[in-house]
Amino acid sequence: MTEAALEQRDARPMTAQEKRVIVASSAGTVVEWYDFFVYGSMAATIAKNFYSNVNPTAAYILALLTFAAGFAARPFGALLFGQLGDLFGRKYAFILTILIMGTSTFLIGLLPDFDSVGIAAPMMLVALRMTQGLALGGEYSGAAVFVGEHAPERRRGFYTSWIQTTASLGLLLSLIVILGVRGLLGKAEFEAFGWRIPFLLSFVLLAASIWMRLRLRESEAFRRMKANDRGARRPLFEAFGYWNTARMALIALFGGTAGQAVVWYTGQFYALFFLTQELKVDHATADLLVAAALVIGAPFFVLFGWLSDRVGRKPIILGGCLLAAALYFPIFKGLTVAANPALAQAQAAAPVRVIADPASCAFQFDPVENADFRSSCDVAKNVLANAGVSYANEAAPAGALARVAIGRTEIAAFEGAGLPREDMAKKRDAFEAEVKKSIAAAGYPLRADPARVDKPKVLVLLTLLIILGAMTYGPIAAQLVEFFPTRIRSTAVALPYHLGNGWFGGILPPLAFAMVAASGNIYSGLWYPIGVALMTFVVGLLLVPETRDRDIFAID
């Protein structure tokens, strides 16, 4: 086909079938993401109901690890449902995935909490989260391949970018539902039982999505492949059993989806957690600001998908990774100034330091509460962690007693080794009271003052984070669809996408908060997404080809 003929064909309006494919695939994927993200949007409430047997910091990190469990399962779902898509068709594979996802979400809403059944509650929660992850592992990649194979060659980035908006819209929908239910019931009743309602509502959304998807027909590329009897007999082995195709998957992972994932999750999830957990902004305000940023930022996914049809997938994705690495520290420090100015002022005027022998300091994370933090360093850090105060570490001579410096004020900790438990508790209470008094005197707030939150500035910064995510996420589906041949496309696309988003991206919130807990610095968690984004930029620049002009209708 000549260049002029291609331009004329691709300039035509969408057909009714193409519109139906995009709407049905996107709507169903919105529901899947809603199901997946409604948990993440209520991580703090989940922690209180399912991990009430441990301290709040450990409970929150455990809730995030449970969130990450769903991501960990995604690559296995990608292998299972990707094979089904290559063997039996894209359409039926993602009808099955949405049915599994919706059912699992509904069941989470029925689970008993820890106070009712003990350890069985979080065990059942983890099992259902992993089931959700298995389903999502087949859902997104199946929908992306389905839409990509229906799209005109020169508009594939634009068509598939509508699928890319679904993750943001799913998160937005979850925030809207949660805000509505919390507003109707009030905070106390919402945390007691109202948190179940957003999970239970997914059943209605599930029924509508299945009805829409049943009306679709299989893609032309798949039907043509089957008609020519060129389908893969063993798609998993053909995709990853040979070095040539396995190498392609590794390049797609390290040179594309890993960086895309951390940039996207930093903007959409870590930013929300950072506002509520580190900056002490109330949940309703943080949810509203993130929801508003998602509304403003959603069109940019389509914009960057459209732009990738003109300038290529590679420069936009890698440009997003590089910009994110350069801008994260300024953006998150700007969020601190805008969302909690009293905290920013206190950090500047009276920075907190723990001056201690590094050899005496342990990692401040104890999910089963077996650790006995008795060294002077551990006592000091534990008190500051419980107070939610960021601090820097300063080395002291070996064997020195740890001190907490708040501006010019220094408070000596105590060595608890060998003390009877009652004496230890009394000394700790006295030390904690003195530290909190000094922290308050230095201007450190217990929570962000709603009247002083600069909402317009916070919204601008959150929207910038969404736009960075859109740069990496908008064109990624088209790039992956074009990267692999038709006979193994569903399987081959699924694994690097879900390894990137499920493992590199899914572990971001708990790992980042663990890094904060270890270092005491609220910004130290940013080093993880920055490192991964820079890795993807380098690998992508050197090894990833430009895929924009590839013919995906070729049988092989």
Image: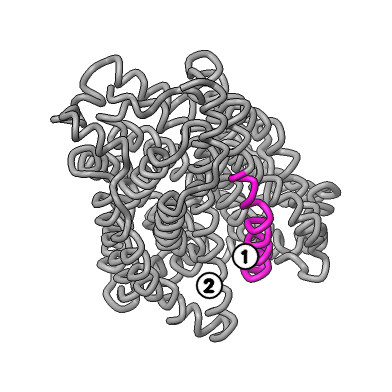
Percent of width and height locating residue 124: 26, 64
Residue type at mark 2? Ile
Number of labels in the image equals 2
Image disc number at residue 287: 1
User: What is the spatial separation of the Cα atoms under label 2 and label 1, in whole angstroms?
Assistant: 9 Å
Seen at 46% across and 53% down, the residue is: 19
Closer to the chain start, of discs 2 and 1, is 2
For residue 438, side relative to residue 115 (left or right): right
Image disc number at residue 344: none
- In this rendering, the answer to whether 448 lies above or below 313 is below
Is residue 397 shown in magenta? no
Residue wearing tag 2: 178
For residue 109, side relative to residue 195 (left or right): left
* Nearest the eye: 410 or 510: 510
- In this rendering, the answer to whether 200 lies above or below 491 is below
Q: Please say whether residue 542 is visible from this viewpoint.
A: yes
Q: Estimate how packed mark 1 is, as few (under 14), some (14 to 19) or many (20 or more) residues with alpha carbons within 10 Å.
A: many
* Contact check, label 2 and label 1, Cβ < 8 Å: yes
Q: Secondary structure at mark 1?
A: helix
Seen at 71% across and 45% down, the residue is: 464
Q: Secondary structure at mark 2?
A: helix
* Nearest the eye: 236 or 209: 209
Percent of width and height locating residue 325: 65, 31
